[in-house]
């Protein structure tokens, strides 16, 4: 299977089909009328709310004037990949569909940029830190599955043939808050040393800290967010979450460019990677 995964492949297929429809000068209503479909069927297909069968895909290709066998085979391959089972599908009963959709996009990203003002990003968390952070919000079984999903996200991303670039910008509050101190004083310093080790071992992972001495910065108002980029021509994606609420924006939504500009502004306030690792390790030592 393509390392981009079924969610990204499905998004690429929908984008290509929408482009072909527009190039053919057809509206959704006209396509539905010619194929004797309900318009809602095409809306669901282009919006990603339903899959598409091989028969329907071939019908669309013929209607859109696709005569190049290579292009048609590319569309069929995207469709087969989009309909394949993903590793995260085993968690569909444990977390929301919206969150799993984000996990699918993340799995196929080429660049991951994230700002976190309060907590260590999930892709950098140890099991103990993840368990402690979510402990008060869910029962034991749900907690076990959430932590398992988080660890698998880390593992599968970094075992890809070409891992993504991961750039994390954290407020200093993230590395100073002693998460888990009432349970085990070693949880937070261990977490900090883990973060430093991950960054030191991979040239594709960068952790930057915005120090307290910077004062106020735009991230304090923006809150946590993640930006994903893809090497497949798919547009940039913005993901924000607050508890169980997840918002994922794709395409040309103007909020994406606004948040990207904010990320660059926050990055400009951060220490460089070497200084950031020094601060992280100093914070760990102070907790021991």
Image (cartoon, helix red, strand yellow):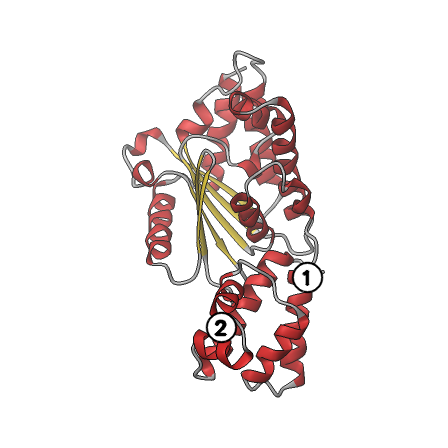
- Figure quadrant of the C terminus: top right
> Whole-percent x and y of residue 189?
55, 22
> Whole-percent x and y of residue 208?
45, 39
Q: Would you call the spot at circle 2 few (<14 residues within 10 Å), some (14-19), or many (20 or more)?
A: some
Residues at badges 2 and 1 in contact (C-beta under 8 Å)? no
Q: Please give the label number shown on residue 2.
A: 1
Relative to the observer, which residue lies in front, 4 or 6?
6
- Quadrant of res 127: top right
Q: Which residue is mark 2?
A: 18
Res. 232 visible in picture = no
Please, is residue 154 above or below residue 107 in the view? above
Question: Of the residues under marks 2 and 1, which one precedes in the sequence?
Answer: 1
**Residue at 55% from the left image edge and 22% from the top image edge:** 135
Give the secondary structure at mark 1. loop
**Residue at 48% from the left image edge and 19% from the top image edge:** 178
> Whole-percent x and y of residue 175?
46, 27
CA–CA distance in space, label 2 to label 1: 22 Å
Relative to the observer, which residue lies in front, 41 or 282?
41
Work out which residue is located at the far top of the displayed protein and give it.
Answer: 182
- 229 left or right, relative to 163: left
Please, is residue 66 above or below residue 99 in the view? below
**Residue at 65% from the left image edge and 67% from the top image edge:** 79
Give the secondary structure at mark 2. helix
**Residue at 56% from the left image edge and 14% from the top image edge:** 185
Relative to the observer, which residue lies in front, 278 or 196?
196
């Amino acid at each position: 299977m393509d390392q981009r995964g079924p969610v990204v492949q499905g998004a690429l297929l929908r984008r290509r089909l929408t482009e072909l429809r527009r190039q053919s000068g057809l509206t959704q209503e006209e396509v539905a009328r010619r194929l004797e479909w309900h318009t809602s069927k095409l809306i669901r297909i282009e919006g990603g709310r339903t899959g598409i069968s091989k028969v329907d895909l071939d019908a669309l290709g013929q209607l859109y004037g696709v005569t190049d066998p290579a292009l048609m085979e590319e569309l069929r391959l995207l469709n087969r990949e989009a309909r394949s089972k993903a590793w995260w599908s085993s968690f569909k009963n444990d977390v929301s569909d919206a969150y799993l959709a984000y996990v699918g996009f993340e799995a196929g990203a080429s660049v991951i940029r994230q700002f976190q003002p309060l907590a260590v990003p999930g892709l950098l968390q140890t099991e103990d830190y993840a368990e402690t952070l979510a402990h008060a919000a869910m029962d034991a079984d749900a907690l076990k599955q959430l932590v398992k999903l988080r660890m698998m996200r880390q593992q599968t991303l970094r075992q890809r043939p070409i891992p993504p670039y991961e750039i994390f910008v954290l407020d200093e509050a993230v590395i100073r808050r002693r998460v888990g101190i009432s349970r085990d004083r070693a949880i937070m310093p261990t977490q900090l040393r883990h973060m430093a080790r991950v960054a030191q071992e991979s040239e594709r992972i960068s952790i930057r800290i915005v120090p307290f001495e910077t004062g106020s910065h735009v991230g304090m108002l923006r809150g946590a967010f993640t930006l994903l980029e893809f090497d497949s021509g798919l547009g940039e994606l913005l993901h924000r979450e607050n508890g169980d609420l997840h918002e994922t924006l794709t395409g040309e939504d103007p909020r994406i460019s606004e948040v990207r500009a904010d990320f660059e502004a926050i990055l400009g306030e951060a220490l460089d990677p070497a200084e950031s690792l020094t601060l992280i390790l100093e914070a760990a030592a102070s907790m021991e």
